[in-house]
Amino acid sequence: MLYLVKDGKTIFTDKTLVGTIGYATPVFSADMKTIVFNPDWVAPPSVLEDKLLPALRRKHYNIVKSNKLQVSYQGKAVDPSKVDWNRVNIHNFTFTQKTGPTNVLGKAKFLYPNKHIVYMHDTLPYRRKVFKEKVRAIGYGCVRMEDPQRFAELLLAEDKEWPASKVKDLWDKGVNSAVTLDTPPPVHTTYFTAVVDEEGEVATFGDLYGLDRKMASALFGDTEGFPVPPPEPKQSQGSVASAPSRHSGGGSGIASSLGFIDD
């Protein structure tokens, strides 16, 4: 869940999708600096290593075309079929998916620079069914939002006193339109299995990533009573399942892992 808090009061909540256990969304804090409307997507290191490089080394160049990726080296376009991917460092290349209806980031991304290369963003229409599920771990570590437009409206009303109509104009017509926040709000990505609500009642949640079990082992030397977390979901044809684990080697295409690819 996403909670927008002002003066100690929650003024907006939104459902989110987080990474699976193989690509767990990390716990950290950082300040949000920028909102980008209708952004391009640049493949992060995890996708380069786990998805693109294995396919390109097998000369499965269709992975680039089917995901509408543009490949460049030092700013110049290159033909991936002309590169010996067994000899080059793929991290020296940039794989970009331009803004549009099939872009994995959807209509907006919210950037709070961090070492994890994690941010919040919109998602593709067919992914939205997952917001109805109780457990919403899917894909890589970035956080997908159910109502990013409303979130942007609230942030920019507070930061710049913008009306919702100005945000909608960028939402509908912007192309890689970046808006720098004058007062960067802190973003705290947290993970709790027990929380006390405003009424003083304790709510408990499943230990999706098995962190309680790890803490129990470190603190008590024993994990009795702390269940093993669920395994990385298996993908099926046409499923909205998550990305395969970094260590599983599974998955032949990016589409099943990102929404269309991943982030």
Image (cartoon, rainbow, N blue to C red):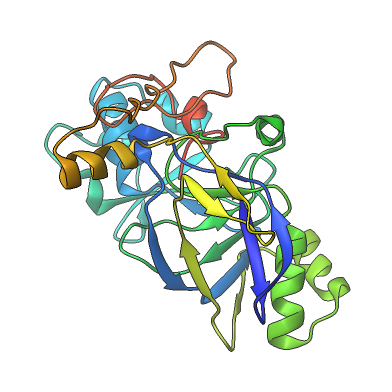
The relative height of residue 242 versus residue 42 in the rendered view (above or below) is above
Residue 115, image x, y percentages: 30, 63
Of all residues, the one furthest to the top in this rendering is 237
Given residues 38 and 209, the one toward you in this image is 209
Asked whether residue 97 appears in the rendered view, the answer is no
What residue is drawn where x is 61% and y is 64%?
176
Of all residues, the one furthest to the front in this rendering is 200
Asked whether residue 233 appears in the rendered view, the answer is yes
Image quadrant in which you'd find residue 57 = top left
Image quadrant in which you'd find residue 134 = top right
Residue 58, image x, y percentages: 26, 20
The relative height of residue 150 versus residue 219 in the rendered view (above or below) is below
Residue 98, image x, y percentages: 56, 50
Image quadrant in which you'd find residue 245 = top left
Residue 60, image x, y percentages: 35, 21
Whether residue 194 sits left or right of residue 114 in the image: it is: right
The relative height of residue 254 versus residue 115 in the rendered view (above or below) is above
Quadrant in the picture for the C terminus: top left
